[in-house]
Image: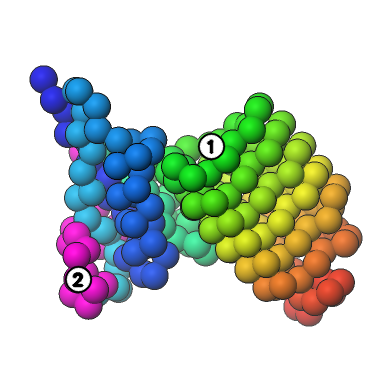
Amino acid sequence: MITTKKLVIMGAGGFGREVHAWLLDAIKNGSCRPTSDTVWEIAGFIDDTSNAPDVFPGLPPILSKIDEFVPSPNTFVVCAIASPAAKKQLTAKLLAKGAEFFTLIHPTVVIGTNVVIGKGTVICPLTVLTTDLVVGEFVTINLGCAVGHDSAIADYCTLSPHCDVTGGVKLMEGAFLGSHAVIVPHVTVGEFAVVGAGSVVIRKVAPGTTVFGVPAKRISG
């Protein structure tokens, strides 16, 4: 008997459309490719505002608003929302309804030894996770990032494309790194802090603050 497992993408914006493409790759060549007893199917999006399927051809439909989504057996939600605060709020609502979340790891991702990855995390193409590190739940790691040995990325963090998280770094819950950000070894970025695009962080970033520049300096919070 063949079981059909459905994937529902939470968020139909630009990142949601990218996640749709990565899911197609995973179904064909990766972690959720069909087997003799399982077929994976992208059912559509859940989203409150976007009309992406009407604008961009070839996309599956928007099934409902996020708050109106009703989980069902053999249906898994893929979190395609980059904002750490929004991820935390929206995933909590769906988890309270009993939703199951899918961990998406693109087939081109390189994963070393002793790497732990939490549920609901999305890891995009050409990322490298080296060795002896932990990635929490509902983390977003976008295109071409590198995460060094002995690092820890807590729940709800987001790494924009081409970030370099070096050895022994700690990203606390909800930290956000802009594109091409670099965190030097053994530095901690606090809870829900923001590191601006292209910044080089050489010292601890306090929770809830925004830093920017080379070297990164506090600009708000």
In the rendering, at what x and y percent does residue 189 appear?
Answer: 76, 56
User: How many discs mark residues in the rendered view?
Assistant: 2
- Residue 6: say if magenta: no
Q: Residues within 10 Å of mark 1 (few under 14, many from 20)?
A: some
Which kind of residue does numbered mark 1 sit on? Answer: Gly
- Residue appearing at x 88%, y 60% in the figure: 203
- The relative height of residue 172 versus residue 13 in the rendered view (above or below) is above
> Which portion, as a residue range, is magenta?
52-74
Q: Which residue is mark 2?
A: 57
Residue 167 is at least partly visible in this image: yes
Q: Which type of secondary structure does the marked residue at label 1 adopt? A: loop
Cα distance between the residues tagged 1 and 2: 33 Å
Q: Name which residue lies at 39% across and 35% down.
A: 31
Side of 132 where 43 appears, left or right: left
The residue carrying mark 1 is 118
Q: Residue at x 69, y 47 (%)?
A: 147
Viewer-proximal residue among 139 and 123: 123
Determine whether label 1 and label 2 are within 8 Å by CB: no
User: Please, which residue is most extreme toward the left here?
Assistant: 1
**Percent x, y of residue 107:** 44, 42
